[in-house]
Structures are given as C-alpha cells and as structure tokens.
Image: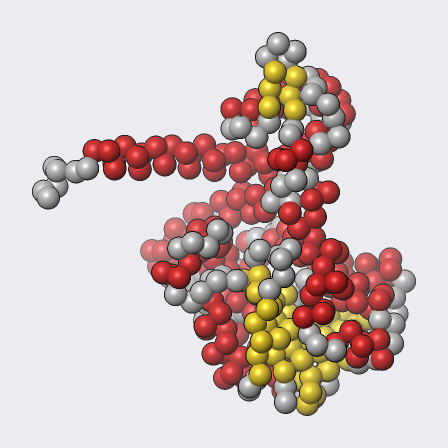
Amino acid sequence: MTTTEIDQARAEEFGGRIVGLLNDSMLCLMISIGHRTELFDTMATLPPSTSAHVAASAGLNERYVREWLNALTVGRIVEYDPASKTYHLPPEYAASLTRAAGPGNLAQMTQFESLMGGVEDDIVECFRHGGGVPYAKFPTFQKLMAEQSADIHDVALFDGTLPLVDGIQARLEAGIDVCDIGCGQGHAINLMAKAYPNSRFTGWDFSEEGIAAARKEAADFGVTNTTFAVKDATTIDVLEQFDFITVFDAIHDQAQPAMVLKGIYDSLRPGGVFLCVDIAGSSNVEENMEHPLAAMLYSVSTFHCMTVSLALDGAGLGTMWGEQKANAMFGEAGFTSVETKKLPVDIMNVYYVCLKE
C-alpha cells in the first residue's frame, strides 16, 4: 500500500470517532458544571420542566441554564419535549450523575477535565524538556480527591473496606495504633476514630490545607483519639509504632515510592497490616485494552500523577503502575504476604492487604 492508497471507509470511521470525542470532551465540561451547580441533583427531583423552572429551582441564571440544558439535550443526556418546551433528566441517567448515587456518581469525576486542561501548556513543555509539573499547580486536586474518596468511605469503609482485612475490626474495637499516610483531609481516619474510640489514629499528609481540614472535621465529629501532622511520606522515621497502616490512592503519586513502602514496613509492628488501596490495572498496556477507564487513567497520569513525581526528580510511577509492579515493590519493601482484593462499589481501585509477619 502506498501513501496515497488508504482504506477510505476506515479513515471516515476514524474521523467520525474524532468528531465524537470533540463533542464528548465538551460535554464532560458541561457535566462538571451540572455537578458543581447541583443542577443534576435539582433536576432529579423535578418533573419535566421549562428552563425557567429548572433555573429557579436551582437558584441559578436562566440564560446559562437554558444553554446548558440545550447542550445536554443534543448530547442525549437530558430529554426535551418541543411541544411543552420542557426538559427532563431520566432516573436511569440520574443514577450516574447525582450525589444520591454515592460512589456511582460519575459526574464528579468530570471535574478533573478542566483541572488537567489548566496545566496543558506546562505538560507540553515537559514533553519538550523533561521534568514535571509541581503539585502546587493543581490547587483543587486534593478537594476533588477528598470528594471522590468520601463517596467510597461513607458507603463502604465499615461494610466493605475494613472487612477485607481479616480480624481488623475486632482489633480496632479492642484498641490499636493506626496511621493513614497521605490522609488528605482525613475523612477515613475521622470515620474510624468515631467508630472505634479505643484505638488511636494518626494522619499524615504534606498538605497544610489538608491537615487543617482534617483537624476541623475531627473537632466537628467530637473525636479526641486522632492526631494529624504535616509530614512528607519519605520522612517516615518511626520503628514498629503502628498495628494498622492505610494508604488510599497515594503510593503511585510518590516521588520515592520504594522509600515510602520501606518506611511503612519498618513502622509496622510484627503482625501489623498495611492496607494499600490503589488504581486497578495491569503493568502491561496490552492487558489494559478492555479496562473501562484505561484511556482516562493514562491521561490523568500524564497530566498529574506521573508529572508531580517527576517534578521532584522522582520515579514517575504513574497512575497505571499496575498490579505486577505493585506486588514486586511490596516484596522489595519486606512484605512476604500480600493478598489482592476488590470491592464491587469501587471500580477504580484494587485493595492490597499486606501482612508483616
């Protein structure tokens, strides 16, 4: 086949796919707006309504709401009746777009679209010159991650996540020392501290803003068995101090993940457990072809997870470091017993239960 001999049908099919991507990428921004303004939550409670009624119910500007509704109408997300000029969000769609859906709310994930787009110029420079984009360039990242993880913790922490670790709930009830590394805004720690008053909980994160939010929530909860501190995970310097350590979606972001994992191993007492929750996927790209979120996750890696690590001259593991690489690194840190588990409500993550024997 010469350069002028192409499969025209294939070319047209691919061109159509690109047109679809152009539409869908802009719809992601509109879905993000619908989430942030709670328009989806409002529409889920309304009968078919005019744009004026939707706007008034949401307390928003009608002209903007109307344009938003029209975009989602042609995008086949909102239904429109031209006779009555009313818009309707089908309940089957609301199940993926509203806060009532809990972990099933995919609308909140579309907020990452504009966040990542905001550093595109910086990423282009990294393609040309190497290096990375520092964490400070992502001012809302922690807030978005806190929202996403809270959806999981509020629904599944006690009935799904903790039961994956054999016997841990009985130990928590009796009283043990727990640490959440990269705790963000500390929601998981505060939930556990409230449920298990006999245990002692520590949260570490390098973000002062995150730690401040964690302390405030602890005060709001009225718990007194938590300690939060601003701490870089690479500086873990305690030996055999904890019985249970958790890390939720943070190891792959680390500049020095091997150092962090070794610090975690050393800080556990014998018989202690490390629960590492991280992105589900394979270390081999060919094994991710059928992964429903693979393209998004590799893209998020390029725009955030990999680059924030490389900005610190780090390993740049990336979001899709994968189960094979993860298990190898757990072994190198000292863990000889690692179980891999999953939760039905969490399509994003895999749960590694690592025992220090």
The total of numbered circles placed on residues is: 0
Name the quadrant of the N terminus. Answer: top left
Identify whether 23 is placed above or below 331. above
In this view, the residue in front, 50 or 346, is: 346
The residue furthest top is 83
In this view, the residue in front, 324 or 213, is: 324
Q: Residue 198 in the image: x percent, y percent? A: 87, 76
In this view, the residue in front, 9 or 24, is: 9
Identify whether 343 is placed above or below 174. above
Residue drawn at the location 54% of the way across and 43% of the way down: 114
Q: Residue 313 in the image: x percent, y percent? A: 45, 70
Q: Is residue 324 left or right of residue 354?
A: left
Q: Is residue 193 visible?
A: yes
Q: Residue 130 in the image: x percent, y percent? A: 37, 61
Residue drawn at the location 62% of the way across and 41% of the way down: 96
Identify whether 57 is placed above or below 213. above
Residue drawn at the location 25% of the way across and 36% of the way down: 11
Q: Residue 307 in the image: x percent, y percent? A: 47, 60
Name the quadrant of the C terminus. Answer: bottom right
Check the image and tell me how it is coloured. Answer: secondary structure
Quadrant of the image occupied by residue 43: top right
Quadrant of the image occupied by residue 85: top right
Q: Is residue 229 visible?
A: no
Identify whether 20 is placed above or below 279. above
Residue drawn at the location 60% of the way across and 23% of the way down: 79
Q: Is residue 192 left or right of residue 136?
A: right
Q: In this view, does 130 lie to the left or right of 200?
A: left
